[in-house]
Image: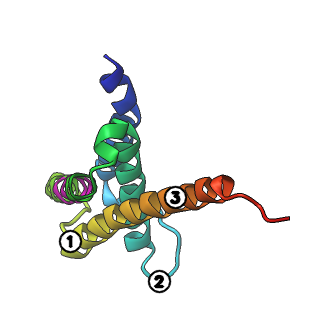
Amino acid sequence: MRWILRMVPLFMVMGGIFYLSHQPGSTLHLPEFYSSDKLLHMLAYAILGGAYLLGLKPFWRERFPFVVGSTLVLCLVYGLLDEYHQSFIPGRSVSGGDVAADFLGGVMAVLLLFAWRKILMVQKEGKRKPHLN
């Protein structure tokens, strides 16, 4: 039961992505700057990857190959399914660039997790070292 509760944020993010992809193209009003669509894809999928990583049991988060592989596969597969879903929505189109941005969002999530872990390790090591004052 705890596993399901930890995965609630993941399912909420997936639902939010699905909802946004289901909107007809004429109703979407993206910010007007270069590559805003790709940046928003990366951000959404970084959040998706982060929600997945937070939902994992700590035991699994310690397994580097599993964490990286499963996060990237999740973001890639959900991105592909999202693009397929959009092919049925009026005014929307399928884009390989969007899938690439989704995958890069997953990469960002993994990199942020490991940067965070490194920061925590450095802080923990700093507390263990005796001060020579």
Q: Is residue 48 rendered magenta in the image?
A: no
Q: Which amino acid does label 1 sit on?
A: Ser
* Element carrying mark 1: loop
View extreme (front): residue: 132
Q: Mark 2 points at which residue?
A: 34
**Numbered mark located on residue 95 in the image:** 1
* Marker count (numbered): 3
Q: Residue 47 at x, y = what percent?
A: 42, 53
**Numbered mark located on residue 16 in the image:** none
> Which quadrant is the C terminus positioned in?
bottom right
Figure quadrant of residue 45? bottom left
Q: Residue 110 at x, y = what percent?
A: 36, 61
View extreme (right): residue: 133
Compared with residue 72, is residue 17 higher up or lower down, i.e. above or below? above
Mark toward the viewer: 2 or 3 = 3
> Considering depth in this image, is 104 or 29 the residue closer to the camera?
104
Q: Residues within 10 Å of mark 1 (few under 14, many from 20)?
A: some
Instruction: Report how far apart the C-alphas of labels 2 and 3 lie in the structure.
Output: 29 Å
